[in-house]
């Protein structure tokens, strides 16, 4: 078996690399310098050399607000055209593709948890591109897993946890949006699920993986900063306007992932582990 990782220097890709290293597993890691997924010939060269049997497609354009204007073309080029190239290459060599998607494929209007087969209706450019990528994977690949996730944080890259901790160093009060509800996801949990898919090979299709439990960004921030000398106050989305629409209620149902036998810890549990990691590193 030959494993290939795209986007191996990104937030999730880096976590996956470290997980595979810890388990002594062989793989080929690529970033945009090694394999430009928007260039069909670049993808073909790497696939011809590596001949992967299982591909973790972590490469993505993730600047959600940027995708609304100056990054709109790049968002589509990476998340749609790039995904098409990787999917076609996987199908050509008979590889299984794991594609990472997002809760932003939903509009956030439902008060119920979104099941894997719930109607999709993305409201921002990033969500639209990721959904287009999903559909390409379904159309092109014989063997695939689409894994939707949300509110990702981890050691390797910019994210909400690091932002809150940094702001707490220079502010004694912070305001955080309290009317957007979702599920935080530790990159370690997500990487472990991706490896679990490789090891157990459940039925192909769409899965949703975040940490268990749900919260608002305000709740998340309070938990991050509960041991810091900073007050966290709630505000509405209207008081904190952003370029890209954010779903108000984007809790994804995790039952299909749980049915594979994968144990999903709560977001509070993994946040505590992550914060302890940060403290240990000084």
Image (cartoon, helix red, strand yellow):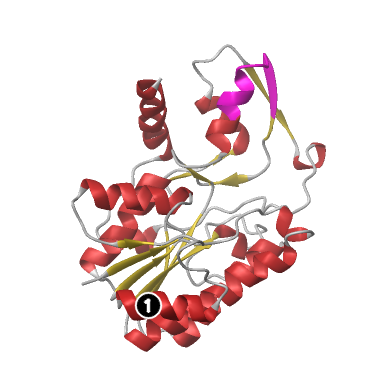
From this viewpoint, is residue 220 visible?
A: no
Q: Is residue 65 magenta?
A: no
Q: Picture coordinates of residue 64 (x, y %)?
A: 67, 54
**Left or right of residue 41, residue 131 in this image:** right
Q: Residue 205: which quarter of the image?
A: bottom left
Is residue 173 magenta-colored?
yes
Q: Nearer the viewer, residue 95 or 200?
A: 95
Q: Residues within 10 Å of mark 1 (few under 14, many from 20)?
A: many
- The answer to which of 167 and 246 lies nearer the viewer is 167
Q: Residue at x 68, y 41 (%)?
A: 179
| Residue drawn at point x = 46 percent, y = 84 percent | 88
Identify the residue position indicated by label 1 in the image.
47
48 sits left or right of 117 in the view: left
Horizontal and vertical percent for residue 188? 36, 45
Residue extent of the magenta highlight: 164-175
Q: Residue at x 42, y 54 (%)?
A: 13
Quadrant of the snapshot with the N terminus: bottom left
Q: Nearer the viewer, residue 115 or 105?
A: 105
Number of on-image labels: 1
């Amino acid at each position: 078996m030959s494993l290939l990782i795209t986007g191996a220097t990104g937030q999730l890709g880096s976590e996956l690399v470290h997980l595979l290293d810890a388990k002594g597993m062989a793989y080929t890691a690529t970033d945009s310098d090694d394999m430009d997924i928007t260039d069909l010939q670049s993808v073909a060269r790497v696939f011809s050399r590596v001949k992967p049997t299982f591909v973790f497609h972590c490469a993505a354009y993730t600047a959600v607000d940027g995708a609304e204007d100056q990054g709109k073309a790049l968002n589509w080029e990476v998340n749609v055209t790039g995904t098409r190239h990787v999917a076609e290459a996987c199908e050509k060599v008979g590889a299984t593709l794991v594609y990472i998607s997002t809760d932003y494929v939903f509009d956030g209007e439902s008060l119920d948890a979104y099941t894997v087969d719930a109607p999709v209706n993305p409201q921002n450019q990033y969500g639209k591109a990721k959904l287009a990528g999903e559909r390409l994977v379904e159309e092109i690949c014989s063997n695939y897993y689409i894994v939707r996730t949300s509110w990702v944080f981890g050691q390797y890259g910019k994210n909400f946890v690091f932002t809150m901790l940094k702001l707490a160093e220079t502010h004694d009060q912070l305001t955080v949006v309290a009317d957007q509800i979702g599920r935080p996801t530790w990159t370690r949990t997500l990487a472990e699920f991706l490896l679990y898919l490789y090891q157990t090979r459940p039925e192909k299709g769409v899965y949703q993986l975040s940490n268990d439990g749900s919260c608002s960004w305000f709740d998340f921030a309070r938990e991050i900063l509960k041991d810091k000398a900073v007050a966290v106050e709630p505000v509405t989305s209207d008081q904190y306007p952003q370029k890209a629409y954010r779903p108000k209620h984007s809790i994804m149902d995790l039952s299909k992932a749980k049915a594979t036998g994968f144990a999903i810890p709560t977001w509070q549990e993994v946040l505590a582990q992550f914060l302890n990691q940060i403290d240990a590193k000084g």
